[in-house]
Structures are given as structure tokens and as C-alpha cells.
Image: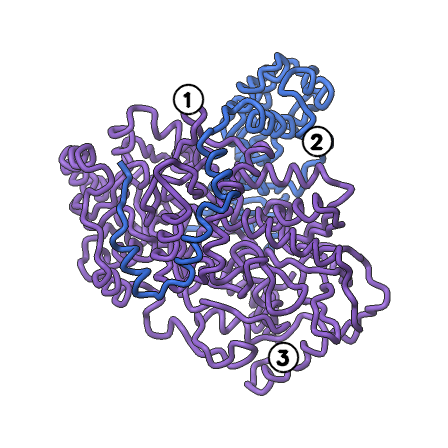
Chain colours: A purple, B blue
Amino acid sequence: MYPDYMMKSIELVEKTRPKRLELAKKLGKQVFPAMSESERQAVLDNFHPDYKKDARRKIRVGVNKGELLTTEVADLLESYSRIDPAIFDFNNPDHETDVLVIGAGSAGMAAAITAGINGSNVLLATKLRLGDSNSMMAQGGIQAADQKDDSPILHYLDVMGGGHFDNKPDLVKALVNDGPVAIKWLEELGVMFDKNQDGSMLVIAGGGTSRKRMHSTRDYTGAGICRVLRDEVYNMPDKIKYLEFTSIIELILDDKGQAVGAIGYHLETKQYMVIKASSVIIATGGFGRLHVRGFETTNHYGATADGLVIAYRAGANLLFMDSVQYHPTGAVFPEQILGFLCTEKIRSMGAQPVNHDGELFVYPLEPRDIEAAAFIRECTERKKGVKTPTGKVGIWLDSPLIDLINGEGAIQKNLPAMLRQFKRFDIDIVKYPMLVYPTLHYQNGGVEVDDKGETKIPGLYVAGEAIGGIHGRNRLMGNSQLDLIVFGRRSGFWASERAKKGVQFGKMNMQYVYDFENEVAKLDIPRKKIAPIVLPDYIPDHVKFKQKTTEYFGTLI
Amino acid sequence: MSEEQKMIKVLIMGEAYDVPEGSTIIMAMEYAGFQMKRGVGCREGFCGACATVYREKGDYKLKGGLACQTVVKEGMILAQIPFVPAEKPVYDIKELTPDIDTIKVLFPTVFRCVACNTCTKACPQEIKVMDYVQALKRGDIARAADLSFDCIRCGLCALRCPAEIVQYNAATLAQRLYGRYLNKKSPELEERIIEIENGKYEKDLDELVEMPREELSKRYYSREIKLK
């Protein structure tokens, strides 16, 4: 429960609630004016963490050399390999497959299923368990323009505007045009979409959408999809083999410059393995566990950008790795759930962000970067945030409005995960607001691909959050769940087609690792700095001191 | 955790460690020096990787929960569950019927349920597990899918079940049967897919793809927003 002094602020929120409810009933979502283009730019420039000094720095090695990247990303990329390739015998691979998929979130599993159905043998490797991913944790929804008053055209405009028009147009076209068929594909696999009585899709709005096109499976949308895909992977044992607790720590190229496999490492038995493949798909997700600028994160334990590291080292180029998505509404109270996602669906259903005095200060459904920056402005420059007992600050997300607007029981029915999450810590979000602050949520950028999901390295494909370009520098709610499926299926199909056509393998060659390491060594970076880090390290310093690992960068696994 | 943080003693797999008060079980184990591989996942209660069993000081009960959602208490005895052994039948969802016959063939064990309710008591998601197992026994797929919806497959029900049912795998089947066969179809979706397949939006999309940034920006900011 909230301490007394916070309850005083809640009383102010309760006092303004009837007026705000009236406003919502009259105006729908437009309870506060949306920002103009210049207002958006001003709030981003002054308050978004990406725009702070030191948030970005020039990368000094690799394909993107000289470009500004998020500082923590540049630090991660300027690192050494976990292995010396010379010790591996490429003539006797431990596994041979048509398609190697790295990562078993929704994108990886959609790719594996698609490649399998297309007739290819698939090896699916994941460093934790099947389904352990950010995909599983998504709550709010999946966008697709399937409503009568909507169209792929409007969806396209929303995606581009949300991304500040930096997005790669061909990828956006693929995303929006494949949207409806992706929904159908999922439904035929058995995903339980929320429906109206007549069978039409129950859709809501999201930040930056011009129509209601957010489909959901309650507020377990990611899980509702990901668990079905996992079950389907289990159902295809003849086509899909999987390796769990197996981290892919380097790609294998051949002397023609094609991706022809990878080196895997089993986290428990500590054995390395050589995998030979006709095509390789990276679906390793994002980087939340890098805790950029010290932010808490909504991301899965495994979100350490491993795929980015291995693709970059092998010579694939990155796009928009200078931008980070902070989700506006991460929990800041209680301490145990710091940084946890409070889904955007809460605002879609009518909850309003209000300050310490219970005042509305922003249109509740701006694109995420704008909304997050406005929250930070409210808490810093305007000093209207609410302090927690441990000195964090947040703004109220007035959840009780949801039942008042949509009828009693609306939270219970549509937001069961959220309700349960807070109830575990004695907070009833039907009665009391939630205290929130922006939290590190999504890797906007990633590896550049074409609309088949293929990178500039022949045979290397990417799907899901590890792709850069679809969302420009800011993704809208529900478009990630969609891109997992759209580009999971596209990369799976084309990787499979490549394998079917037959790849002329050259000699396996990992000279690129030495070349990259030589560049790194010139910067006087110590040899102990290795990546991918595979898992985040939360061991406290005094313990690390006794483990004699204080100097070690990366994670001992 | 700040320096003046109050510490409490817990027993991790039998060994005593001082950990900060208010930590979740995962945070406590990491504080003690464990680099977690199994028994940890999303850390937000969505993935089911961190099923845990524990006893509290002075309480005879063996309790279960999610290690990322359970706060440690003085004297707690903790153990993470690395893995839950469970069989899952392989099936082709396209060839099933959403009825009791499918359940009989694929999950005959559900008929062993003795209605003891241990599964429901074990569920950290407060799902009425026994009730959905009963629904499966009746062939009521819709009810089973609905009741089991919030399941995150942590496996605690299956570990405690005296009838040795793997409830959560049966739940997945019910959900998939419902999603594919029983949930009413959306006519709009079908119509839109046909439009797209016929290339209705192709020309306009290509025009947008080629459109200069300024013009696109103008189109964007002047688009009509209809969310009522």
C-alpha cells in the first residue's frame, strides 16, 4: 500500500477525477490537446534521454565506424570475441541444417515454423528456454489495419509519423500490408484474439494511431501469441530441432562472404559446437538489460543484444542504433517492481497521466518518445512529480478511471495481468492510481535488412527487435508484435528458399574475427572486454571482489 | 540497494545468507552471488521460468510461487526449480475437433483428476486449475480456455498433482482449439485480406514509399484521427 504522504497526493488526484471523467466522456481520448510538430521537437530536445550529452558517442570500429551510437551500444560493440576461431574444426560440424534460427521469441519461432512448413530442416538455438523473450512479456496488443474505417495506407502514415519519418519505407510497406494476413495466420494457429459478440475484432487505440487497430488477447497479448508458437514448434519435431541454453556467440562466414553457420556455447555443460547452415536468421531481440543511462528496464533477463554484436562483428551494418525507446509508464512503486511495464493499454482504455496535484499535463496517447519526454519534463523542470520513499520520482497513472469510463469490471476483464501484478504488493489499481516513470523498453534500431529480412551479408537474415529501420527512431505500441510475425515469416520463408535453391559453400573462414579484434586492440581496449555478454550481471561488487571478477567485462557463464 | 539497507537472513538451498530486506527471491539469490541461468526469466511474472518452493520460519507448509514476484522473509528456506519434466503430445491443430474426443485421445490423464484442488492452491496466478481440468473432462473447451487463460506455464500445478496430470499443456491445447475453431471469425479481416491480395493498396503504398519527407509529414499531420 502507499505510504500516508503519497495518499495525500492521491487525494488531490481523486478530487480532480470527476471533472476529468466528464471530459473523457465528452471528448473520448482527446482530453488534452495533442502536440504540434514543433512542440514535439522541443520536448524531445530538452527532455528525452537520447538527447542528453554523452547519450551517444562515435563508434570507432566496424562498418558503422564514425557514426554516433548509443554510448552503451558502442561500448558493447568495441569488444573481443569469446573464442579463438582457430581452435575449431570446421570440417566436422556438430550440427548441419538448412536454416539456423538464433533466438526463440515470437520472431524466431515464427521464422522456424515458416521455414519448416516450407520444407526446410530448421535448427532453433536459444540461450534460455523456448519462448524466453520480450515477446512473451508484451501486454497491450498487436496492430493490423483490418477495420472498415482503416487501411494499410493509414497504418503506414501512423508508423512513419511515429518514427519521425526516418523509417525505411520498404520495410514499413511490408509491415502494414502483411498485417491482416499475419493476424489470420495467428488465429489459425489458435491465438485467442479478443472479439466482440459478432466475431469482429475488439480493437482499441494506441499512442500515435489514427484508428483503433490494436488487437489483443487480454493484457497477455505477447504470451497469447508466443505460447501458441512454442506449442507449434513442439508439434513439428520432424522439421524443427531445438537447442536450449545454447548461446550463439559467433557467426561463421565462408571465403565468399556468405553466412554459413555459427559457433554455439552451451551454458550448462560449457561445450562449444560448430553449426553449419545454408541460411542463418538472427532473432535475438533487444538490449534492455544493458540498462542504458542507468534506466530500469521492462526487458527479459536475456535481452543483452547478442545478435547485434555477432552480426556487427561479421560485417552487417546497423541502422538507428542511436535511439532508445523509453516506455512512458514503467512502475516506480513499490521498489520490487521497479521498471516493470504498465502496458499502454491502460491509457488506451482511458487512464490519464496526472501530476502530483492531480492535473492533466499531456495528451495521454502521444507517440512513446513524446509521452515519455513529457513525463520527464513534468518531474524535472516543472517539479510536479511524486517522490517515492527511496527517492525515485513518478507521475500518477489514474487507473480507476477505466472502470468509471468502461463500466465496473473492465480492469478485471481487460487488464488481469496488471491487476494481479499490483495486488501482489497490496495495491488495488481499481481504486488507486499507479505511480509510473519512463523505463527502458525497446531497441528502435538494429541490423539493416531488405523486405525479405536479408542483411548485406548473403545468407544472413534478421527478424524481430534486432532489425533496424522498421520503426525509425520511435516505435508505436503494437507494431513490434506485428513485426515479429511479419518479418519472422518473411525471413523464415526466404531463408528456406535460399536453402532449397542450394548454397554453393565456400571454405569456412572466420578471419573477420581477427580483423575486428585487431581494430579493437588498436584502441587499447583490454582483452578482458568480451561480448556477447549473454546474461546481465547483477552480482554486487563486494561479492564480485571475492569472486575475483571485478575486472571482468561481460558475464561469467 | 543502499548501504543502510536492513538485512535479513535467508536459507538458499540450506545455506544461510544475509540479503537486503524487501528483495524478491531472485534479487536475494543474486545478492548472495548466484549467476542465475535456470529459474530466472522475464522477472516480471509473465514467463513462468522461476517457479520456486519455500518454507517460512515456523510454518509447516510447503509454499510455491514465482521467485521474481515473491519477497523474502527472515528465516525463509528457498529452492529454485530448474525444470519441470512433462510430456506433451504432438498434434496437428488443423486435424483436431474442439471436443471431448480430442481431450480423450491427447490428454487421457485429465480423467484421472480426483478433484482434490491441490493444483488450484498451488497456482501463483490464482487460476482455478481444478475447474478447468473439470471443464476439459466435460469437453467444455471454451470454459477451459477461458479459465486457464492467464496460465504462464510455471509447472507448479503439475508438480503437486497427485493424479500426475500436466494441466498446463492441456490448457494450451484448449486455448488453441478455442482460438482456431470456437472463436467467431471476423468478416472484416477476411475482406481486408482479399483486398490486399488483389493489390488494392499497392499503388497508393508505393506512392507513399516514394513520397518526399516534407510531403509525407504534411499528409501525416493532416490525417483525420478517429478514435471515438
Q: Quadrant of the N terminus of chain B?
A: bottom left
The outermost residue toward the bottom is A522
Q: Give how far apart the Cα atoms at labels 3 and 2 are.
A: 46 Å
Mark 2 — on which chain does it sit? B
Residue drawn at (42%, 33%) of the image = A420
Question: Element type at marker 1?
Answer: loop
Mark 3 — on which chain does it sit? A
Classify residue B120 as left or right of residue A387.
Answer: right
Question: Element type at marker 2?
Answer: loop
User: Amino acid under label 2?
Assistant: Asp
- Judging depth in this view, the residue of A513 and A238 nearest the camera is A238
Residue drawn at (66%, 44%) of the image = A113
Classify residue B110 as left or right of residue A179.
Answer: right
The residue that disc 2 covers is: B92
The residue that disc 1 covers is: A197
Give percent across and percent down for residue A557: 65, 60
User: Amino acid under label 3?
Assistant: Phe
Give the crowd class for mark 2: few <14, some 14-19, many >=20 residues within 10 Å: few
Give percent across and percent down for residue A303: 54, 56
User: Amino acid under label 1?
Assistant: Gln
Query: Compared to A462, does A193 lie above or below?
Result: above
Give percent across and percent down for residue A93: 82, 62
- Judging depth in this view, the residue of B225 and A508 nearest the camera is B225
Can residue A425 be spotted in the picture? no
The residue that disc 3 covers is: A516
Q: Give how far apart the Cα atoms at labels 1 and 2 are.
A: 28 Å
First-in-chain label (3 vs 1):
1
Residue drawn at (65%, 72%) of the image = A81
Question: Element type at marker 3?
Answer: helix
